[in-house]
Structure formats: structure tokens, C-alpha cells
Amino acid sequence: MDFANSLTQWYLKNKRDLPWRNTRNPYFIWLSEIMLQQTRVAQGMPYFFSFTNAFPTVFDLANASEEQVLKLWQGLGYYSRARNLHKTAQYIASDLNGIFPNTYKELLQLKGIGEYTAAAIASFSFDENVPVVDGNVFRVLSRYFDVETDILSSGAKKEFAALAYELMPKDNPALFNQAIMEFGALQCVPKNPNCEVCPFNNSCLALQKNKIDQLPVKSKKAKARNRYFNYVIFSDDYQNTVIQKRSNKGIWHNLYEFPLIETEKEVDLDYVVEQLQQQHFVENSIVSIAQMNSVSQIHKLTHQHLYIKFWKVTVAGSLDNAVDYSTLLSFPFPIVIFNFIEKDWK
């Protein structure tokens, strides 16, 4: 059986109609690939349309402020992607006159573009014979050929890329790359794939050896770290509040939040009162303090679990550098905070 031919035949019958597949414009392909890292297509699609409407060219994205970019990205997570996207757009617009590099090696030099994204742009936009290797490709190839290499090991990507390159028809790399990724996304899914309707059910080694649920081999992730965030919602006589920008490296860099008391475990009202007296977030005298959510919200990130409480602190007079509710909504926040503002503010 010709693996590539069967794969592309399946793809042409079953592929989804996605907007970034109807173009060879490297700007749109780049946007889609960055957005779909760690993100499902259904979740990423509205963001793709928002970005292409707001920033139809790389020059428009380059000329936007970082806050505009982060605000549009709000809720998509992994915000370093948005910051790198913005910086790379500025570089392409100013240093490259808006023209994307047209080779895999040159694309790799751009900030925020790794091997997978460079391969996608190079093959989809410029027909370069370079294979894409993402989670879908790892899964399809490891199952079909019974490859037991740990996909998180140092040499795995090189091994799977060499295998994909060998299979790839050199006259249409884009079609093959799209096909193998789509096959992993729709047919050869991580759990309980329907192998009865798979075009490779007579040749897949994992199916023959009853190893579908064992492949690909992937070493266990490190245990997530627990963090406890206590956000202080100050409210003055005019129902205005104060926010701050997260300037430290790490999660949510350059997004906004309320004054924060981070602790090593869950804390009670007495502890929050004590910290408010010690940290002097504001000069106003405190009128009352109340917990706004009785149970901590748990916000799960890749390597961290955040236990979040919101505390309303009513103060006398007017707060310095305060913002009102409508202004608050215009700032880019982590989605867990933005949802609180929209749903539980009053």
C-alpha cells in the first residue's frame, strides 16, 4: 500500500474547510499556526477571524500596541505566543519590508517560530520539502510503524521527521503535511480511535499488535505546582478600583490583575487583613473586607494549578490612579480574572 497516496485520498474526502487552508499567504498561515499551538481548532477559529479583521496585514499587526494584541488574545492562553507574534510582526514589517522569509532555515530565525511552525509555513506557502512534526504526526507514525521511541526524548523529533520526509511526495509537500495532521486530528485520535473505518486497518502495525492505546510512548509529565492567589478588589466611594500590570517574567507577563497576595496555602480573612496592614497597597482607610467567592476557583495551567480567591475591600474616599468598571473591561486580563469582572463584579 502507498501510505502517502492513501493518506491524501482520505484527506481530500474528509478534510475540514478551514480558512487558513484557502490561502498561501504566509502571514495568515503563520497566525493560524501560532494560534493553534496548544489550542483546539474550534477554540482558535474565532481568534483567527478577530486577528485577521483587526490586523489584515503584518504591517497592521506591527503597528498595534502590545495591549491591543493581548486584549484580542485574551482567553487563548500561553500569552508569550501573542507577545512573540507582535515582536516578530514588527521585525518583518520594519526590517524585512513586510516580506516573510521563504525557507525553513530563515523562518527558524524568527522569534516564536520553532521547527514545527517553520516547517508548516515553508511547506504550505513556499512548497519546501520539509515535514511537519506535531502531536498528530507523532501519533500517526508511531502507531502505523510501531515506533516505540519516547516522543519527549531528545532524538524523537529528528527520527520522526526523517520518517515523514521519506514518506512525503516531493512534488506536493503541503498536501501531505496537511493530510497527516488532519488524519491525526480526526481519525487517528488519542483515545478510542475508530479503527474499523480507518483506511490503514489492514496495514497498521499497532492495530495488528493490539498496541493502539500504548502508542505513542510519552514519558510522564512533572507534577503540577500549586499556587494560591488572593486578589484584592479595592472599591472606593465611587465604586472605582485599582489594577496593576504583571511585569515579572512567568505566567501572564504584561497582563493586568488586581493587587495580589500570593500564599503557600489557602488562607482565611484574618491573614488577608494582616497582609493588608503590612503591604500598604493603598493609602485609604479600610471600611470593610469580605471574601467574594466562598470556594477557591481552580485555574489549571500546564505546570501549575492556581487556587484563586477574590477579596472585596471597601475603602473610604477616592483611590489614586483608580479605574471605573467600563474602563476595566478594556484592559487585557488573564481570562480567569476577566470572567470574574464580567460575571461576579457586582
Image (cartoon, grey):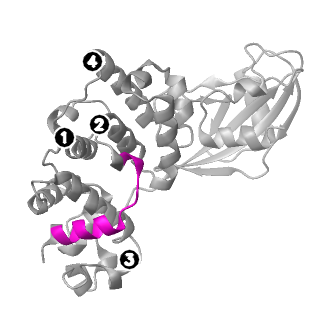
Of label 3 and label 4, which has the lower sequence position? 4
Instruction: Tell me, yes or no, whether the two marked residues, 2 and 3, touch with CB atoms within 8 Å.
Output: no
Direction from residue 66 to residue 29 in the image, left or right: left
Prevailing secondary structure class for the magenta stretch in the rendered image? helix
Of tags 1 and 3, which is closer to the observer? 1
Q: Distance between the Cα atoms at labels 3 and 4?
A: 46 Å
Q: Amino acid at mark 3?
A: Pro
- The residue identified by callout 2 is 26
In the picture of the structure, the residue carrying the numbered disc 1 is 126
- Inspect the image, locate mark 2, and give the three-letter code of the amino acid beneath it: Pro
Residue 170 appears at what percent x and percent y?
9, 54
Q: Secondary structure at mark 3?
A: loop
The range drawn in magenta is: 5-20
Q: Is residue 236 left or right of residue 95?
A: right
Amino acid type at mark 1: Phe
Amino acid type of the residue tagged 4 in the rendering: Asn
Are dots 1 and 4 in contact, CB under 8 Å? no
Whether tag 4 and tag 2 are in contact, CB under 8 A, the answer is no
Residue receiving disc 4: 97
Question: Which corner quadrant of the image does residue 108 belong to?
Answer: top left
The secondary structure type at the circle numbered 1 is helix
The first of marks 2 and 3 along the sequence is 2
Q: Position of residue 20 (x, y in %)?
A: 37, 46
| Mark 2 touches mark 1? (CB < 8 Å) | yes
Q: Is there a contact, CB below 8 Å, between mark 1 and mark 3? A: no
Name the quarter where the N terminus is drawn.
bottom left
Where on the picture, by quarter, is residue 14?
bottom left
